[in-house]
Amino acid sequence: MKRNSPTKTSELLQERGAALATPTDLTRSATKDIAGAMNAILADVFALYLKTKNFHWHMSGRHFRDYHLLLDEHGEQLFAMTDPIAERIRKIGGGTIKSIGHIARLQRVLDNDAEYVDPSDMIAELAEDNKTLAGRLREAHNVCDEHRDVATASLIEVWIDETERRTWFLSEIKRGRQQ
């Protein structure tokens, strides 16, 4: 196995620490603000994805099949958001999350590690988490508007609609269980 020379190693370490040189007409401040807002969204989406899959895997009871399939669909929607969010952050010259630990430091969605969660509580918790995510997406949209980043704002608008749809479905299930 060939070893790198001390000079080559030094060059590699310098490259690793170099700032991104992605061409954008956004200011450095705009990139920092938007990347910060979107990395928090990305962490929340990963956390909500995992919680949704957790509840999907641990669903039980009378409506098992329907809820299991619904949560699988919701998980797919959430996971589908992750790559476009991260790529958008990179397109504007920002850095994005790098690890599970990084996600844990940024996420605002609370984990649920309980051994057993009643199906109605799962539905209620996910409805509230999705509702909160929609609000956070609106906050991120405001950051984009402030910096005239219409491309990121446009993506966020679609994600708000998808998140509101998930909230609606879960809330209707929750409402039906209260009657």
Image: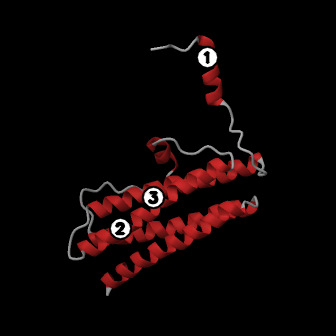
Give the spatial CA distance, label 2 vs label 3.
12 Å
- Could you tell me the amino acid type at mark 3? Phe
Give x and y (percent) for residue 69: 31, 70
Residue displayed at 68% across by 61% down? 151
27 in relation to 161, above or below: above
Query: At numbered mark 1, what does the secondary structure look like: helix, strand or loop?
Result: helix
Q: Is residue 155 left or right of residue 76?
A: right
- Could you tell me the amino acid type at mark 1? Lys
| Residue designated by label 1 | 8
Quarter holding residue 146 = bottom right
Label 2 Cα neighbours within 10 Å, binned few <14 / some 14-19 / many ≥20: many
Give x and y (percent) for residue 109: 46, 58
46 in relation to 177, above or below: above
Viewport quadrant of the C terminus: bottom left
Give the spatial CA distance, label 1 vs label 2.
49 Å
| Residue designated by label 2 | 71
Asked if the residues shown at circle 1 and circle 2 are in contact, with their CB atoms under 8 angstroms apart, the answer is no
Quarter holding residue 114 = bottom left
| Residue designated by label 3 | 79
